[in-house]
Image: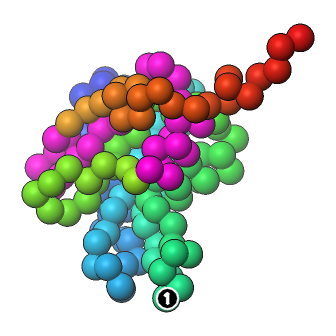
C-alpha cells in the first residue's frame, strides 16, 4: 500500500472513530488511528463518563486495541478533533504514545481538511521518560 493511500485510510479511520465518540458532556469528539511497525491498523475514540475524570481518550483506546491485537510498536498515529486549533494528544496520551514509540514514530494532528501538522515523538514530548530509563545496569 502506498504511503499516500495509507495516510488517507488512516485519516478516514480516525475521522470515522471521531464520529463515533461518546461525548455527551464535553461535546468534543476525538478520534485516533494507528498503523504499527508490522502494518496493522487500529483505531479508537474518546469515551466520556458522568464521573468526568474516568473517561478515556481516543489515543488510549487505539493503543489498548493495538496491544490487544498483539502489537506494541506505533509507526504512525493520526489524531483528529474539531475546531480551528490543533487537537494534540493530552499529556497522559503523549506518555502512552511514547511507551510504544521509536525515534521514527510520527504523530499526525488532523482537522476536517486533513493533516494539519506532523511531529516526531521527540517534538511532541521532548526529553521524555521511557522504558529505557528503567533498564538496570548489569
* SS at circle 1: loop
Q: Position of residue 59 (x, y in %)?
A: 46, 53
Residue at screen point 56% across, 27% down = 38
- In this view, the residue in front, 68 or 104, is 104
> For the residue carrying disc 1, how many other residues have a C-alpha within 10 Å: few (<14), some (14-19), or many (20+)?
few
Q: Position of residue 103 (x, y in %)?
A: 47, 19
Q: Within the image, what quadrant is residue 34 found in?
A: top left
Q: Within the image, what quadrant is residue 131 found in?
A: top right
Res 99 seen here = yes
The residue that mark 1 highlights is 50
Res 13 seen here = no
Residue at screen point 35% across, 85% down = 25
Q: Is residue 71 above or below residue 46?
A: above
The span picked out in magenta is 91-116
**Extreme residue toward the top, this view:** 138
Residue at screen point 30% across, 25% down = 3
Q: Position of residue 43 (x, y in %)?
A: 46, 53
Q: Position of residue 130 (x, y in %)?
A: 61, 31
User: Is 32 covered by the magenta stretch?
Assistant: no
- In this view, the residue in front, 72 or 123, is 123
Does residue 13 appear left or right of residue 55 in this picture? left
Quadrant of the snapshot with the C terminus: top right
**Extreme residue toward the right, this view:** 138
Q: Is residue 83 above or below residue 135?
A: below
- In this view, the residue in front, 110 or 54, is 54
Amino acid at each position: 500500500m502506498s504511503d499516500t493511500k495509507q495516510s488517507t485510510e488512516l485519516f478516514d479511520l480516525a475521522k470515522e472513530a471521531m464520529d463515533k465518540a461518546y461525548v455527551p458532556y464535553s461535546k468534543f469528539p476525538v478520534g485516533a488511528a494507528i498503523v504499527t511497525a508490522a502494518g496493522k491498523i487500529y483505531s479508537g475514540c474518546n469515551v466520556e463518563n458522568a464521573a468526568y475524570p474516568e473517561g478515556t481518550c481516543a489515543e488510549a483506546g487505539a493503543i489498548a486495541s493495538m496491544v490487544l491485537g498483539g502489537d506494541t510498536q506505533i509507526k504512525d498515529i493520526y489524531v483528529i478533533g474539531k475546531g480551528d486549533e490543533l487537537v494534540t494528544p493530552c499529556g497522559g496520551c503523549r506518555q502512552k504514545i511514547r511507551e510504544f514509540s521509536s525515534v521514527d514514530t510520527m504523530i499526525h494532528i488532523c482537522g476536517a481538511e486533513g493533516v494539519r501538522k506532523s511531529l516526531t515523538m521527540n517534538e511532541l514530548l521532548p526529553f521524555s521518560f521511557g522504558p529505557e530509563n528503567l533498564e538496570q545496569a548489569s
